[in-house]
Amino acid sequence: MPNVAVCTPSVGMVRTRYCSSLIRMLVHYQNHPILGMEEEPRYISYHVIEGSMVGSARETFVDDILTLDSTHLLFIDEDMGFREDVLNILLSRQMPFVSCNYRMKVPPCPFTSRKEDDSTWLETNKDSTSLEKAFATGFGFSLIERKVLEAVSKPRFSNAWSEKLNAYSTEDRSFCIKAREAGYPVMVDHKASKRVYHVGTY
């Protein structure tokens, strides 16, 4: 029985496309069956934290959600646009940790997911249709089951130095590493990825 907590860390710059996408998604979720869970009742809640520290907001979200009866945490960033059925698609996969792949906002705009061996960026193209394991992924639109949150210890979201990237990583990379170490692979859903977009200059 899915009970999804939608969590958005915000710096106070929520995009119009995020708002309109969220409304359509909520209506669709309540009125359309989820493949494989057609007879199950569905619940959803919405949570937002405003502040400049995204990693700290994500930590607070997880702490709060673990005190509730939520089965899934859905991270959606405030600069994402998405089709109304993306949440239903991700839930139908019935995977502990499944995320969408999308392009960064800064040129040359690579994708946010990394290949399973962390050698380079994982791309979603016109021929990508199914699930694929990743080393790490962005949390712009990412669905995580409760058992994964329970298995990942603090600090869950930290900006650590990455030799592979030759830069400090984003907070989502450190969570992905810990989830994989706990036995939960990071899965990218290419079908759903084609239905989300990052709202930036381009």
Image (cartoon, rainbow, N blue to C red):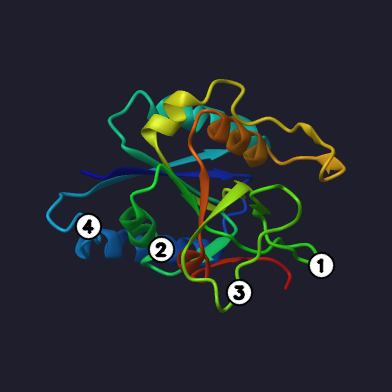
Badge 2: residue crowd in 10 Å (few <14, some 14–19, many ≥20):
many
Residues marked 3 and 4 touching at CB (< 8 Å): no
Q: Specify whether 39 is left or right of 97.
A: left
Residue at 36 percent across and 66 percent down: it is: 85
- The amino acid marked with disc number 4 is Gly
Q: Residue furthest bottom?
A: 126
At 40% across and 42% down in the image, what residue appears?
A: 96
Q: Earlier in the sequence, mark 4 or mark 1?
A: 4
Query: In the rendered image, which residue does mark 3 sit on?
Result: 125
Q: Quadrant of the C terminus?
A: bottom right
* Residue 145 in picture, x, y percent from top left: 39, 39
Say whether marks 1 and 3 touch (CB < 8 Å). Answer: no
Q: Mark 2 is on which residue type?
A: Val
Q: Earlier in the sequence, mark 2 or mark 4?
A: 4
Q: Residue furthest front?
A: 117
Q: Quadrant of residue 110?
A: bottom right
**In this figure, which residue is indicated by the disc labeled 2?**
86
Mark nearer the viewer, 4 or 1: 4
Q: Is residue 21 above or below residue 49?
A: below
Alpha carbons under labels 3 and 2: distance apart: 17 Å
According to the picture, the residue beneath numbered tag 4 turns out to be: 36
Q: Of tags 2 and 4, which is closer to the observer?
A: 4
Quadrant where the N terminus is found in the figure: top left
Which residue carries the number 1 mark? 108
Number of numbered markers:
4
Provide the secondary structure element on which disc 3 rests: loop
Q: Residue at x 49, y 50 (%)?
A: 142
In front: label 1 or label 3: 3
Question: Is tag 3's residue or tag 2's residue first in the polypeptide sequence?
Answer: 2
